[in-house]
Every structure is written in C-alpha cells, then in structure tokens.
Image (cartoon, rainbow, N blue to C red):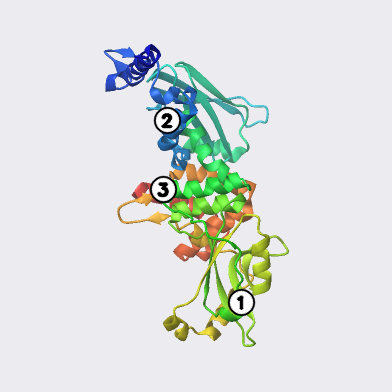
Amino acid sequence: MDMSLVSSRWGALALCFLGLGLGTGSTVSGFKVPFRVNDVLPVLPAEVSWPVLNGLHSAVDLMPTYVGSVSPYNGTVKWKGACFLGNEATLEFTEGDRGLGGGVLHLKTANAHSWTCMDLYVFATPYRVTWDYYFSAREHTLNIESWEEQAELDYVKQHGISVFLMPSGMLGTLLSLVDVLPLFSNTIFGQKANLAFLKKHMGATFELRPKPWQATIDPADVHSGDFLAVSKIRGRWGGFESLEKWVTGAFAGHTAVCLKDDEGQLWVGESGHENEKGEEVIAIMPWEEWWADALKDSSNPQIALLPLHPEKRAKFNNTAAWMFAKSMAGKPYGYHNMIFSWIDTVADNYPPPLDAHLVISVMSMWTRLQPAYAANMLNEALNKRLGTEVLLHHLLFFFFFISFWEKVF
C-alpha cells in the first residue's frame, strides 16, 4: 500500500479529531480544540474547500444580528458571539474637541470556541455605522472622537449604541460577499454569477436558446394588454434584480405592458423609466424607442412577450387602459410596492425579517446620503400602505411604526 496515502488518511483523521472535538463541541474534557474545520477550510486545496464553503454560506449571512444597545446608563450588556461565548460591553462619555464630547465603547471578549476564530461586529446609531473585529480574548476599545451633532448625543443618551454581530464571523461574511458582489459585474463572469445565484437560491434555471438569440417582433402581432416580462442578468441592474427575485420569488425583475392607440401605433407603458432630469418615473414610450433601448442595454435583458388569452383580450377595455396610463404618466416610480414585496406567509418570512434597530440605523444613514431615494422608499411606501399620505415628509412616523411593531410582536 502507498504509505503516503496512509499518512494522508491519518492526517485527515487527526484533523477531524482536533477540529471537530470528536463531535462534543468546541472542547474535549475541558481541553479547547486548536481549531474547527470551518476555520481552516480556506487554507485547504480549492477543489476541497470551495464546494463546502459555498454550501455553508449565502447572502442571508450578510444580515447582522442585533445583540444589544449600550449606553452609559444601562450598565453592562452581555451576549454570546459566534466565536467568543462570553462578551460584555459598557459605554462611557468622554471630552471632545467640538463641544459635544465623544465616547469609548469597552468590549470584553472571553471563552473562544477555538484558537483560530474571530468575531466581526457592526456598531451603529442613526448618524454613523462602523465596524471592528476581535481575534483575542481581552478587553477592546472603540473610540468615538466626537458625536456628529447634538441629536446623536441625545440619541445615544436615550437609546445607546446598537451592537450587531455578524453571525457567520469574518470568514462567513467574506464568503457571503463573494456570493453577492460578482452579481453586479457587467461582464460574462457577472452574468454567470447571476445565473448561478438564481439556481442556488431559487432553483431557477435559464435554458440556452438556439440562435438567433435576438428575435424580430412585428408590432402588428402585438395587441393592447400584452405583457412584457424582462429579466436583466448582469451589471448594476442585473445584480439588483437577482436579489429582488430572490426575496420576492419572482422570475422577472421588470415588467411592462403594451398599448395600441386608435391609429394602430404600438406603445409601451412601464415604471422606472429615467427621464431627462434623471428621475425614475412612469412613462409611455413608442414601441420602436423602447425596443431600441432594450437592444442597447448592457445588462443583457432577457425579454418575454406574453400575449393576453383570447378570452381576456375580448374583455380588455383599451379606452380605460389609456385613460389610466395617461393619468399615471410622469409620476414617480412605485417604490411603495417594492418595500412590501418580500415573501411573507402565514408560516414564515423569507428572507428573515430585518431587525428594527438595523433598519433605523441604516435607513437614517441612507436618508442623509440619498434623501430623494429614501423619501420615496420609506415615506411613500408606508404612507401608501397605511393611508397616511399627510405624513409623507416625516420620517418620524416610520420610526414610531418600527418601535410599535417591535413592542407588539
């Protein structure tokens, strides 16, 4: 027998013994194992490690887990981490150079499950988001030189700094990014990444059609009410649509409807069309213009023309459809639909609901970076849903709603 083969087998057994702890967890009779198999997978040959790693992590692992809020007035906050089982944090205010003061977050880590793991954290208020990672069991500090403004200081006094744990650790988070970031690449590699993502997370497959891949559509064969289903599979919008499909269960990332006028001219009504000002609005475009834009689109859109069933076509009220389309033309893109389109069933939500503390922190930051988008996504969405359009310009209602939801459920 080949002795090198025997040696490698004994090495593998030793690896399992040390890494898995004989199946008893992270310790064996009080002895901490040097590492877990997950911790050393990246250094193994790619043909061995990557299939396992890809199966262990997905885009869901990018969602931080809320572990607590730390303020100078609520004592010590304690929790279990992904690596360190014993963690605690306190916050103290310090003098600052802007008259507002600052703070020091003291975070103590202990009792790691192995010698090679680490914990990754996100710290957030509605005015800042920062992160840090911890590899050793000791006391760590996160210094905040100065609060952004008086409102942040008041917020921290009342609510504290929210602490979020990346439950998959540093490695799992990086692997989740590897699962997501390539989706936005406007290349063949990005296209393959999107198709692989949809197959992995949705079981959706795109079958390669025989050439020619570009069909010729005669407008005379298209009628009012016929449906256009669009699926972009690379670039910025391709990546966004893949994530949108994943959370909504839809197999199309964009839709449009065909309309014919009294003269037989074919038009396309769609939402999300960018006008001359760069605004995304509802628009009615001539078919030729819409089709030309689709052919030039670098995101490689896959377009399906779905005719109305003859029975439905006979009942289609073209006059009413045109009246409605004209009344909507120029209005903002329907963000109020997007925010409520995640899969929500009686039994479960998928992906899991976002933590309220995370939503408040991220959306508040987003409001400062892109106020127009944030206003559309949040204010328009919630007010449309709840019939409170008078609050359109006030994010306070959103924060009240989140706090109420958290307390009730």
Image position of 54 with respect to 248: above or below: above
Precedes in sequence: disc 1 or disc 3: 1
Query: Residue 161 at what x, y percent from top left?
Result: 50, 34
Residue that numbered label 2 is attached to: 74
Q: Is residue 213 left or right of residue 166?
A: right
Q: Are marks 1 and 3 in contact (CB under 8 Å)?
A: no
The amino acid marked with disc number 1 is Asp
**What whole-number distance in Å separates the C-alpha atoms at marks 1 and 3?**
41 Å
Q: In the picture shown, does residue 402 fall above or below 164?
A: below
Q: Secondary structure at mark 3?
A: loop
Q: CA distance from mark 2 to mark 1?
A: 69 Å
Label 1 Cα crowd, 10 Å radius (few <14 / some 14-19 / many 20+): few
Lower sequence index among marks 3 and 2 = 2
Q: Callout 2, which amino acid? A: Asn
* Percent of width and height locating residue 176: 49, 37
Secondary structure state at the residue bearing disc 1: loop
Residue 313: x %, y % from top left: 47, 82
Q: Is residue 310 above or below residue 377?
A: below
Q: CA distance from mark 3 to mark 2?
A: 32 Å
Q: Residue at x 57, y 56 (%)?
A: 232
Most distant residue in the bottom direction:
262
Residue 218: image tag:
1
Q: Residue at x 62, y 30 (%)?
A: 146
| Residue 85 appears anywhere in the view | no
- Which quadrant of the rendered structure holds the N terminus? top left
* Residue ID for mark 3: 351
Labels 2 and 1 touching (C-beta < 8 A):
no
Give whichever of discs 2 and 1 has the lower sequence position. 2
Q: Residues within 10 Å of mark 3 (few under 14, many from 20)?
A: some
Left or right relative to 38: residue 180: right
